[in-house]
Image: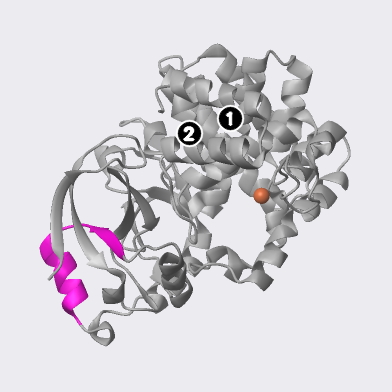
Amino acid sequence: MAQMFNQTVAGNSGTAPQKSMVMMSIEKFPVGFSVPFDVCKKEGSTYACVLKKWQKFDQAFKADLKSKGIFFLYVEGDPAKVNQYFETKPAENKPDDLAYAAYSKTKEAFHNVSKLIFTVGSRVNFSIYKILNMRHEPLIETLPEKPVLVTDAVRTANGDIAIKVSDLKHYREYLFSQSKNSASDISTKITSVKECAKMSVRDVLTDPTNAKNIDNAVCSANDIIKILKQKDAALNTMLTKNASDMYIYNHSTNVSVLSVAMALAMGMDQSQTEKLAIGAIMHDIGKKNLPAAMQHKRERLSDAEFAVWKKHVADGVDLLQSQTGLPSESFVAVKQHHERLSGTGYPYGLKANYIRPFGKIISIVNCYDSLTTPRPFKTTMTPFNALDRIMKETTEKGDFDLELVKLFIKILKGQGRL
Ligand SMILES: [Fe+2]
């Protein structure tokens, strides 16, 4: 019989809602099946998510847990439902692989958006959907030529909301009208910058050869600098962590936001800050060349797949170098975002003296955001645990610049994120 604990759980958001955690032997997890709950491991008095809801518990993951001496996990949810799931034979659990495969395909036609940008009573000329149980269900259905009023259902919808990719143009116009509206509060303006940045990343990844897409990404990088200079609190609003389907768009935006925050704290001049922000927002552009199946994969990548994955760095530099007008310093941020001062990074294995300031900054913020943002095959960590790990890797292995890590911690502390 599984043991049940009712304890305060520190979630990713840093808040601590009261949740039930059911302790479960890893032997009880059906191998090869997706788990319909978030699953955590215990870290001191808190829990760290190791498997997001609907991720697959596979043999490699189980072996990895055993190798780390982890034989029990904590399943978050209604204890009755959790126990029912684990007491049911695996073959009788509803297989969801087909549903996930269908969802992975369907979601390509959608773009997740922020609820915060919508004002009840304003007009939209595009449909809005809520995402529930891997399905997109309409909240508002309309056509470009038939604007309708935004209802409360959009602001209060549970979970993420999305629009169709074919409506991005109309959504951009809506964002523009919202941010220009003098009645809009500062948080609407900040959200608008973030939403525009996410779209710019999508456009660049879709077609990096289109000069207009590159220009829009450069504009977004400049808007991030402007809003962070204008309003200190903008950093927190910009770093939202939901919408894991949009990992690469959120992550690229976050890395640019955090790089700019570092540049401003270091007193970097405007020109250098711009070059860093541009490189940061496009640092993962090379992932455009990765097979879609690899990007949607819920299991850990094999060694062979990881070798392919690493190529996104050089591919990104190649894609950007084919564009004219981009500052060459921005390429450094792209080129060195996975390097480590100890020489253990990739793809070049550069050592400290060969890693430039942009590389030192972006490698820290990229690592932090990767550790704290949910994605298919990685453990999600709390900001505290992620920084603890980065600090350990700095002091024990010499991976990162100690003074920059200290500054980064100071910035996040100042924002109340620790
Ligand atoms: Fe990367």
Label 1 residue SS: helix
Residue type at tag 2: Leu
Q: Residues within 10 Å of mark 1 (few under 14, many from 20)?
A: many
Q: Residues within 10 Å of mark 2 (few under 14, many from 20)?
A: some
Nearest to N terminus: mark 2 or mark 1: 2
The residue wearing badge 1 is 258
The quadrant holding residue 360 is top right
Residue type at tag 1: Leu
Which colour scheme appears in the figure?
one colour
Verify whether residue 132 appears in magenta.
no
Verify whether residue 79 appears in magenta.
yes
17 or 190: nearer the viewer? 17
The quadrant holding residue 21 is bottom left
Number of callouts: 2
Which quarter of the figure is the C terminus placed in? top left
Label 2 residue SS: loop
Tell me, yes or no, if residue 223 can be seen here.
no
Q: Position of residue 95 (x, y in %)?
A: 33, 80
280 or 82: nearer the viewer? 82
339 or 124: nearer the viewer? 339
Q: Position of residue 14 (x, y in %)?
A: 34, 35
Q: Are marks 2 and 1 in contact (CB under 8 Å)?
A: yes
Q: Is the CB of mark 1 within 8 Å of ligand 1? A: no
Residue depicted at x 83% and y 32%: 329
The residue wearing badge 2 is 239
